[in-house]
Image (tube, coloured by chain):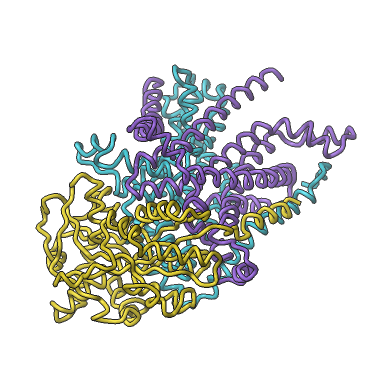
Amino acid sequence: MSYRFLFLLMLLFSINSSANELLHVSFDVTRELFKEINADFKKKHDLKVKIHQSHGGSGKQTSAIMHGLPANIVSLALPYHMDILAEKELVSSNWRDLYPNNSSPFTTRIVFLVHKNNPKGIYNWSDLINPGIKVITGNPKTSGGALWNYAAAWVYAMKNHKVPQDYIHKLYNNAPILDSTARASAVTFIKRNIGDVLITWESEAKYIISKFDNNFDIIYPELTVKIDIPVAVILKKKNQDYANQYIKFLFSSEGQAIANKYFYHSYKHDGKMDKNIVDIEDYFKWSDFKSQHFGSDGIFEQIYK
Amino acid sequence: MKKYFVTLTYLIIIVCFMIPILSLFAIALSEGFDVYWQAIKHEEALEAIRLSIIIALIAVPINLVFGIGASWCIAKFDFPGKSMLTALIDLPFAISPVISGFIFLTIFGMDSVLGSWLASHGIQFIFAIPAIVIATMFITLPFIARELIPLMQEHGNEEEEAAIALGASGIKTFWYITLPNIKWGILYGILISLSRAFGEFGAVSVVSGHIRGKTTSIPMHVEILYNEYNYVAAFSVASVLAILAIITMILKNSLLSVKNVDLEKSQ
Amino acid sequence: MTKTNILPFFKISFSYTIFYLLLLVILPISYLVFHATQLDLNDFISSVTNDRVLAAYQLTITVALGAAIINIILGLLISWTLVRYDFFGKSILEMFVDLPLALPTAIAGLILATIYSPGGAFGKILSKLGIQVAFTNLGILMALILVGLPLAVRTLEPIIREIDSDVESAAYGLGASGLQVFLRVYLPGFMPSIISAFSICFARALSEYGAVIFIASNIPKESEIVSMLIYSKIEQFDYNEATAIALVMLLLSFFILWAINAYAKRWII
């Protein structure tokens, strides 16, 4: 009796009401950025299309899409996550070639955020393993930003330590808590007042400073990593035209201008100007990195055994 | 003796209950009423409110029917396995909401037989409203039953038995004898289920997909605002639920006093 | 008892109840159990016995126990006062007791986290005394006490109302002190309700999520409750581990509930 009614109601809600809707699944720190981009996109193109956003840790969102989250557009925190989707044929296998800069409309880099006047004197990766220093970084299994942090730390360790595992172990032993997303890490550092340094992106760090009245300082360590933010259209979905237009908008001058407002660099920005910046993919392929560090005997897992 | 008890009670209730609620409103209104109102009027907040209402409107009536039926057979009859049945009804109350949500995630997610069947037929269950509704139904299942069972047990079977013996039909007996006895319990149970349905967080967090403006309930929206450093807006939207809670509180109190007046009159 | 029940609707209400429970409770939980049995036994055991999980179980059970005990003490105090005494503002206090029941757990958690953090109303005062509540396990305790208190009060009120004043006056007449009267006359009568209230508060505290996660620092092995741990595993899509941990927690909860339901019967006799 009430079951038929219930089931009908369920069907009503579940039938893909994607008539003119786009779901953009993104990662955590891009919330404000895409809010503004979406508003501008709609204004400029006067489209009768509604854009919904979902945010969460990049790794988590990737898995969610594989588990059925009905995305039309996806923007992730690192190319590796996009490769996972390509493997599952959710995005084109040649997604890198579809748009400039390996389909990455914005870039940024890794920095350290410390309290005003840097009371603990943290200037470089080597300082992070000093005893008593509390480092805030995220869970590399769920957060794309945290995975970048981990990878960057590894590159530093490879270049400066005979046994890179030692550095990584010491670093993560100084990390009291691994939040699941980059934003949660930031909240831990800023609101809960836990930690002496937050490893984060330059864009996020500058955003935080703009919001919190200069209670923090940005430190540029000697080694940093160029961060690409890949975007792609999910295949076999409705409204592909709109989706493609949306992506083009991200690369357009208006889209780029908004990104600059949120402290991202344009895809045209030549990161190699700064000699401190390295490209992770010069050191390893992400898929190799993943099997080496995560999963049953991964180096990351060893830290917590 | 009395002085100490009363003072202590005052202290506990003021510190633990009153001040937190007042703080919520203080922070929500700290930047003026305009900002407060803007936060609530914001499109995504209104969508969250709308979603919460839809979920509650589905989950609560269904659980009401269940609650009445279950309490009837448990309170008025004896049968083997009764305590097991009661424990089963209590189970959703005792399970962590995260586990509750997780159970439905595994049942309806793409990995399962049911999930992939639904997906291949174009039905979006998980990470969409249906999953949220089912999770909420699970969570709010015990509330009305738990209210009514002790109430019905307290009233005993005599009145109903008398009516049946005198030849009244089952339905008439239920409508004219049982229902009036339990009406306060029903009302209160509905109020509490409603509050819980609106405010459920853990289970919904797990199954919803966090699609802003579409599958974010009010508490999830509050969390989102909190994670965007927007504390005033977060508490402004939260105050909607706080106001609902306060209304529930006041209603329950007046229900009780009306009930007491009723009792007195009937004596 | 072989008294035949002449009341109608047993079959229909019973079958409806069973059917609904089957669909919404029994089948889903069975699926979880079934899913758990599909796991490799070694994986299962290592999922639930590693340091982080054990620490979470220990923390969750300990804080829940502490909160339940404190809830009983405070609950007795409050319900005694509200039932037995009349005083100015009593109806307002009565009203507020029910507040945490109606307030969403996440909202409660956020408020608590804010006012007990070093910059908040209470936090400021407490830090002068050197006590930190927010982002410590003390904060978790506070949150659990808050959500359980109304349950304790409401469960204890009925039995306090039923105090037989004749017995009470007799005891006093015979020269017993207040404390003696309480311990010898009331407490035995209260026990069933106290046990009931304790089990409700304990079960609630074990499973609480929303109220705790904002005020806890959620540091693995230190301040991470089981619900949070499971949520992390879900976010990482480590479904197998989440299943294992959840199942053990479920078994625990069900066992406690059932034991109390059965145990309480003994006391009532």
- Residue C89: x and y in percent read 45, 19
Among the chains pictured, the one given purple colouring is: B
Residue at the outermost right position:
B167
What residue is at 74 percent from the left and 42 percent from the top? B76
What's the colour of chain A in the image? yellow
The part of the image, by quadrant, that contains residue A179 is bottom left
Q: Is residue C145 left or right of residue B106?
A: left
Rendered-image quadrant of the N terminus of chain B: top left
- Residue B128: x and y in percent read 55, 57
Rendered-image quadrant of the C terminus of chain B: top right
Between B142 and C102, the one nearer to me in the picture: C102
What residue is at 24 percent from the left and 81 percent from the top? A283
- Residue B261: x and y in percent read 64, 19
Looking at the picture, does residue A302 appear above or below residue A124?
Answer: below
- Residue B173: x and y in percent read 81, 35
Q: Is residue B75 left or right of residue B146?
A: right
What's the colour of chain C in the image? cyan
Between C16 and A273, the one nearer to me in the picture: A273
Looking at the picture, does residue C163 appear above or below residue A231?
Answer: above
